[in-house]
Amino acid sequence: MIESWGGAGAASVPPKVPESRPIPLGAPGIPPDAAQHRPAARAPPSDSLARPGAGAVVEEHASADGSARLVVRLRDGAAVETVMLTSGSLCVSTQVGCAVGCLFCMTGRDGLVRNLSVDEIVAQVAFARERRPVRRVLFMGMGEPSHNLAATLEAMVALRRDFGIGRKNLVFSTVGSPATFDRLLAHEVRPALALSLHATDATLRARLLPRAPAIEPRALFDAAMAYSDGARQPLQVQWTLLEGVNDGDEETDRLAAWMRGRRAIVNFIPWNDVPGTGFARPGLERCRALVRRFHRMGVLAKLRWSVASDVNGACGQLRGAVG
Ligand code: SF4
């Protein structure tokens, strides 16, 4: 989540929720392509906000700046989080947990629990629309959308059809693989793409994103760029800034060189505190200097502050816990 949210006024209704048990990666009975399985549930073809069986909002943490984090309890007792931004954007989850296990993120700490169904993804938008208009949906919440690709794409179709959200306002955020980009390009929606790159050096990226597909970052960037050009949408590069890890000139200048002259923008996201990781956020002046440096090189860059860290709703802090 890369806009302001979080703050005062948390309204909690802590229910009794059965504990979700994370499924270890590679567990028997979990096929490697489990994420690709088509869920049975379909979003109803209406603007109805009632999604029987798709879960319920059990907590709403309102922000001082007008944004809010919703906790949605699913029918099996698992929970996911959805963040409403003041801009009319909504950050939704596609999985309970996450298999990628990025070191700087809370969501992936316990691995993947399960995929969400189409209805469970669409319901997050429906719940948000009960509270405010939703013009843009960011698939940047809990989970890796490419690991639940069929459901995510079907949810996008439903959001266009039933809620009138255009494809440029559907943002698919992923650690990426060329196979995913091929499927996106072949699909009728062809959403905007946000590539979670975070590093240009292969060894560093493999350390930070331990279970992302093992692809040379340059090849990954080029494949993402080819998708975005094909979909006629600018590429968004996501880069969580970690002090002394990926905020140095060598790393970032390489990224700038890749991006120069391309239809792309990098979102620098100063890291949000996740206990026990050992990372730190670069200082404000370093973050600003980095953006200025990119602009001098003729590359689009923005500094995206996640707030809501006070309600654990910022980028990398979502964990799907009730209470
Ligand atoms: S940053 Fe995204 S892909 Fe990485 S563990 Fe967190 S939710 Fe998963």
Image (spheres, rainbow, N blue to C red):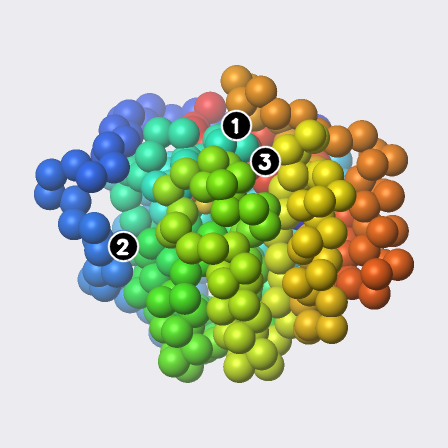
Q: Nearer the viewer, mark 2 or mark 3?
A: 2
Q: Residue at x 38, y 51 (%)?
A: 213
Q: Quadrant of residue 14?
A: top left
Q: Are marks 2 and 3 in contact (CB under 8 Å)?
A: no
Question: Mark 1 sits on what residue?
Answer: 12
Closer mark to the observer between disc 1 and disc 2? 2
Q: Tell me if label 1 and label 2 are in contact, CB under 8 Å.
A: no
Circle 2 SS class: helix
Distance from disc 2 to disc 3, alpha carbons, whole Å, reads 25 Å
From the viewer's side, name the closer residue of 182 and 293: 293
Extreme residue in the left direction? 29
Residue 265, percent from left and from top:
70, 62
The type of residue carrying mark 1 is: Ser
Query: Looking at the image, do the residues carrying marks 1 and 3 touch, with CB atoms under 8 Å apart?
Result: no
Q: Is residue 248 visible?
A: yes
Circle 2 is placed at which residue position?
35
| Location of residue 157 with respect to 180 vertically, above or below | below
Viewer-nearest of labels 1 and 3?
A: 3
Whether the residue carrying mark 2 lies under 8 Å from ligand 1 is answered with no
Label whose residue precedes the other's in the sequence (2 or 3): 2
